[in-house]
């Protein structure tokens, strides 16, 4: 029997793998594409949880509609008609400040009036206009303090907690915000750079909206995985390029062959496979794990109208923050009830994840009751434990990206995208997926994109 040589094999059927097939099939429907997936389900970190009428998320809680590739997927699949839409402009975000919830400024101008910053801290923000950019990479905390002063650090901390559940004293500014750094170096100031960018783009539309679905975010996976050739329970253990130019990809049970291979995996599982082709500068990168404590209450709970809150480390709270899920997305709780999802752990506090579930629930409730009026105990409480964590783009990351570039140049037909390489959000995954799909079809590396300046919404 003739052995099948696939045009493309994608390792991993999370959003990265599924989005890559989506774009590949759209551009070249004739290509034979196979996905190999370690577990028994597609979707990776995206996993919705439904019990007793409450709908929570183990992983991502939605994605913003400000990236073309994700919008394209929604339109192509018809999911744009099903999606629930939460305009960020209508939903306040709160920060825990001196033991109370304070609304976060949504626009740069409202920074001037917020009680979250002292007068001195507000004046110091203007230092950005004349402070010379440092060329070298720095942690986000060092960079923010240098450009904007110490006073702004708790707000930067919550931004980092809300996106990476990370530690801003370890994450690399060059890796996390390459677009902002480009602007800083080009204009000598972030404020000047943003102004120039706004002038160039001539539009300053409303804030983006957050998307999810009435069945939970897993609906996106369900639709993207439909009619795809996926082999489940197939953990890839090795890949080798043969002299005749194609790859052998080995799982425990079977060998597969393909002209092109896409590693659509989080950085660490990718490194363990790729290190057999070339030694990476680091064996693994840090990962931040969080648990999601889903709490259902009757509607006597006085949850503020908004998106949720975050607490900077200086507030010394048990929970990192909480999402006011049923305020944002209707149908997340039975009639007469509300759902709140509190986040625990993160890069700084892995020890909290070792506590028993009852203890975690108790401590979360003790914490949140000081911030929100919860007159009754919860009617529903579950600790959801995502299997993986969020890869952390810390100070070694730019070196790792350089190594990936060299490896991809050397190994023709090898493409590397996925969780933690070029970012951590779903929108980062869809962007990389389209770039990889286009590069495969073009038979090369594809255009390197200029680092975009991403808005920070947390
Ligand atoms: C707790 C949490 C909250 C998040 N919140 C948000 C959010 O609110 N908004 C947002 O935009 N993003 C969020 N994210 C990030 C988002 O989930 C990721 O961007 C996205 O899911 C990554 O997709 P991926 O396909 O690259 O990786 P994954 O989802 O990790 O998928 C990788 C797949 O590869 C498989 N695999 C691994 N090793 C092998 C192997 N050797 N062989 C074959 N298969 C393998 C895995 O089983 C998995 O299915 C969150 C992530 C987490 C963990």
Image (cartoon, helix red, strand yellow):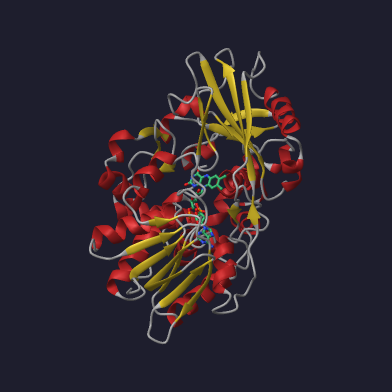
Displayed quadrant of residue 20 = bottom left
Q: Residue at x 57, y 54 (%)?
A: 127
Numbered label tally = 0
Camera-side residue of 271 and 2? 2
User: Where does the image place residue 397, in percent across and percent down from the top left?
Assistant: 58, 66
Q: Residue at x 64, y 17 (%)?
A: 374
Camera-side residue of 331 and 43? 43
In-image side of 284 versus 318 (left or right): left
In-image side of 237 versus 42 (left or right): right
Outermost bottom residue: 243
Q: Residue at x 31, y 75 (%)?
A: 443
The quadrant of the rendering that contains the N terminus is bottom left
User: Where does the image place residue 361, in percent across and percent down from the top left?
Assistant: 70, 29
In-image side of 39 versus 19 (left or right): right
Q: Residue at x 63, y 26 (%)?
A: 381
User: Where does the image place residue 70, in percent across and percent down from the top left?
Assistant: 35, 49
Displayed quadrant of residue 32 = bottom left
Would residue 371 be visible to someone looking at this image?
Answer: yes
Would residue 453 be visible to someone looking at this image?
Answer: no
User: Where does the image place residue 136, in percent across and percent down from the top left?
Assistant: 59, 70
Compared with 59, 298 (above or below) is above
Camera-side residue of 313 and 379? 379
Displayed quadrant of residue 384 = top right
Camera-side residue of 264 and 71? 264
Compared with 383, 420 (above or below) is below
Compared with 371, 165 (above or below) is below
């Amino acid at each position: 029997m003739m052995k099948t040589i696939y045009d493309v094999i994608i390792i991993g059927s999370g959003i990265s793998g599924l989005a890559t097939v989506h774009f590949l099939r759209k551009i070249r429907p004739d290509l034979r594409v196979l996905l190999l997936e370690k577990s028994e389900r597609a979707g990776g970190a995206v996993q919705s949880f439904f019990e007793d009428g409450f709908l929570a998320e183990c992983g991502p809680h939605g994605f913003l509609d400000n990236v073309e590739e994700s919008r394209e997927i929604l339109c192509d699949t018809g999911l744009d008609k099903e999606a629930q839409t939460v305009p960020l402009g209508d939903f306040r975000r709160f920060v825990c400040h001196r033991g109370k919830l304070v609304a976060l400024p949504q626009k740069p101008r409202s920074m001037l009036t917020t009680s979250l910053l002292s007068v001195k801290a507000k004046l110091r923000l203007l230092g950005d206009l004349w402070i010379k950019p440092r060329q070298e990479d720095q942690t986000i905390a060092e960079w923010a303090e240098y450009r904007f002063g110490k006073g702004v650090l708790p707000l930067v901390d919550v931004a980092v907690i809300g996106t990476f559940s990370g530690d801003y004293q370890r994450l690399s500014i060059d890796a996390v915000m390459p677009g902002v750094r480009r602007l800083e170096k080009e204009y000598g100031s972030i404020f000047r750079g943003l102004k120039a960018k706004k002038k160039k783009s001539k539009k300053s539309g409303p804030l983006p909206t957050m998307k999810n679905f009435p069945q939970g975010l897993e609906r996106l996976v369900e639709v993207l995985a439909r009619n795809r050739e996926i082999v489940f329970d197939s953990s890839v253990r090795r890949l080798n390029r043969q002299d005749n130019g194609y790859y052998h990809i080995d799982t425990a049970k079977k060998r597969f062959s393909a002209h092109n291979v896409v590693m659509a995996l989080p950085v660490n599982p990718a490194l363990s496979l790729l290190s057999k082709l070339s030694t990476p500068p680091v064996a693994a990168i840090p990962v931040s794990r969080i648990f999601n404590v889903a709490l259902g209450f009757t509607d006597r709970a006085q949850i503020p109208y908004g998106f949720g809150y975050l607490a900077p480390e200086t507030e010394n709270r048990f929970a990192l923050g909480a999402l006011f899920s049923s305020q944002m997305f209707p149908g997340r709780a039975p009639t007469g009830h509300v759902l709140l999802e509190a986040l625990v752990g993160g890069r700084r506090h892995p020890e909290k994840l070792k506590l028993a579930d009852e203890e975690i629930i108790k401590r979360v409730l003790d914490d949140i009751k000081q911030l929100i009026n919860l007159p009754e105990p919860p009617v529903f409480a579950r600790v959801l434990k995502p299997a993986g964590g969020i890869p952390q783009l810390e100070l070694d990351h730019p070196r790792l990206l350089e190594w990936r570039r060299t490896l991809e140049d050397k190994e023709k037909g090898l493409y590397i995208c996925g969780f933690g390489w070029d970012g951590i959000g779903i929108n980062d995954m869809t962007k990389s997926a389209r770039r990889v799909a286009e590069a495969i079809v073009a038979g090369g590396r594809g255009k390197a994109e200029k680092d975009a300046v991403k808005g920070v919404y947390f």
